Image (spheres, helix red, strand yellow):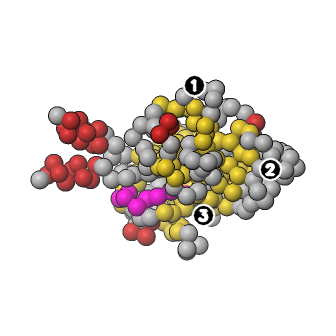
């Protein structure tokens, strides 16, 4: 009976949420790939050793341009090159309209399964519009 | 057999993060020598159930370095009044002598903190002059 209870408790812990940023105004969001707001404040250092899938979530309160989107990159301590956390084409959230955003679950690349640094990046802005987001997080499982 | 596979998959050590502050450009003006709650405020305190966690580390994103000896470390409380180090001897700690996102070492959580606790982050060993600047600060547990 105790074993069953422990197993049930364990089964409830198969997801985890990694916060990336609270309220953020992406002032004059640029066209090119740019770290969140052009700042490094929101970089996260985390152990993804046992993570296999990820998805991005946030709430958007101010609209962006039709082509704007946000995704997440990683780098390792020993390699300064930023790379896509997932090679899936669906691993992003569009920043076009306001509302709750959530990407599809996507497999993470093997190189990210360890102690890594994460950053959110945006692209597709027009250098004028200021999309605004909050509660930006990465859910992992 | 399938139950064993499922349960072993479920108990993977997924990252568990308690955000302390996710703001940008947080400046601690004249960070003091004495142990002081982060930026002199209790506003970032939060509650977490650490019952089933044994180790913790503090991660600090440092935009501007502080005084050479300055550190940050987490503290816990069971009454939101008296606070104690989450690990032994003011650990896990992050030095503020450089910039960049920095994880402390993993340290054992003291036995008294393995329950429902209030958590905060404290700084000490500034020089009352330097103004370190911070991005995201959080506690990761496992």
Q: Residue at x 33, y 53 (%)?
A: B12
On whether residue A49 falls in the magenta region, the answer is: yes
Most common secondary structure along the magenta stretch? loop
Q: Mark 3 = which residue?
A: A33
Q: Chain of mark 1?
A: B
Q: Chain of mark 2?
A: B
Q: Residue at x 68, y 49 (%)?
A: B72
Q: Nearer the viewer, residue A15 or A63?
A: A15
Circle 2/circle 3 CB separation < 8 Å: no
The residues tagged by marks 3 and 1 sit, at their Cα atoms, a distance apart of: 46 Å
On whether residue A17 falls in the magenta region, the answer is: no
Q: Residue at x 25, y 39 (%)?
A: A6
Q: Is residue B58 visible?
A: no
Q: Is residue B16 visible?
A: yes
Q: Nearer the viewer, residue A30 or B95?
A: B95
Give, as a single range, the part of the protein colored magenta.
A45-52
Q: Position of residue A76 (x, y in %)?
A: 53, 69
Q: Residue at x 14, y 52 (%)?
A: B2
Label 2 neighbourhood size at 10 Å, few (<14), some (14-19), many (20+)? Answer: many
Q: Mark 1 = which residue?
A: B79
Image side of residue B129 versus residue A15, left or right:
right
Q: Chain of mark 3?
A: A
Label 3 neighbourhood size at 10 Å, few (<14), some (14-19), many (20+)? Answer: some
Q: Position of residue B50 (x, y in %)?
A: 45, 38
Q: Mark 2 = which residue?
A: B126
User: Of circles 3 and 1, which is in front?
Assistant: 1
């Amino acid at each position: 009976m105790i074993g069953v209870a422990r197993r049930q408790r364990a089964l409830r812990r198969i997801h985890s949420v990694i916060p990336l940023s609270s309220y953020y105004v992406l002032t004059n969001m640029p066209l090119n790939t740019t770290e969140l707001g052009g700042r490094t404040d929101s970089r996260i250092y985390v152990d993804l050793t046992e993570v296999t899938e990820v998805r991005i979530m946030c709430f958007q309160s101010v609209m962006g341009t039709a082509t704007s989107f946000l995704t997440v990159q990683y780098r390792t301590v020993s390699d300064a090159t930023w790379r896509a956390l997932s090679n899936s084409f669906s691993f992003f959230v569009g920043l076009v309209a306001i509302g709750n955003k959530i990407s599809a679950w996507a497999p993470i690349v093997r190189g990210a399964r360890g102690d890594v640094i994460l950053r959110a990046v945006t692209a597709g802005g027009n250098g004028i519009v200021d999309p605004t987001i909050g509660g930006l997080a990465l859910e992992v499982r | 057999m399938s139950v064993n596979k499922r349960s072993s998959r479920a108990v993977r050590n997924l990252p568990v993060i308690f955000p302390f502050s996710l703001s940008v450009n947080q400046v601690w003006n004249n960070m003091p020598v004495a142990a002081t709650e982060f930026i002199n405020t209790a506003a970032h305190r939060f509650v977490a159930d650490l019952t089933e966690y044994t180790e913790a580390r503090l991660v600090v994103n440092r935009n501007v370095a502080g005084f050479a000896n300055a550190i940050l470390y987490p503290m816990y409380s069971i009454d939101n009044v008296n606070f104690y180090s989450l690990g032994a001897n003011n650990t896990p700690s992050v030095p503020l002598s450089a910039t960049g996102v920095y994880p402390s070492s993993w340290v054992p959580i003291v036995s008294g903190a393995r329950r429902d606790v209030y958590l905060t982050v404290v700084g000490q060993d500034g020089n009352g002059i330097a103004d370190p600047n911070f991005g995201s600060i959080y506690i990761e547990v496992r």
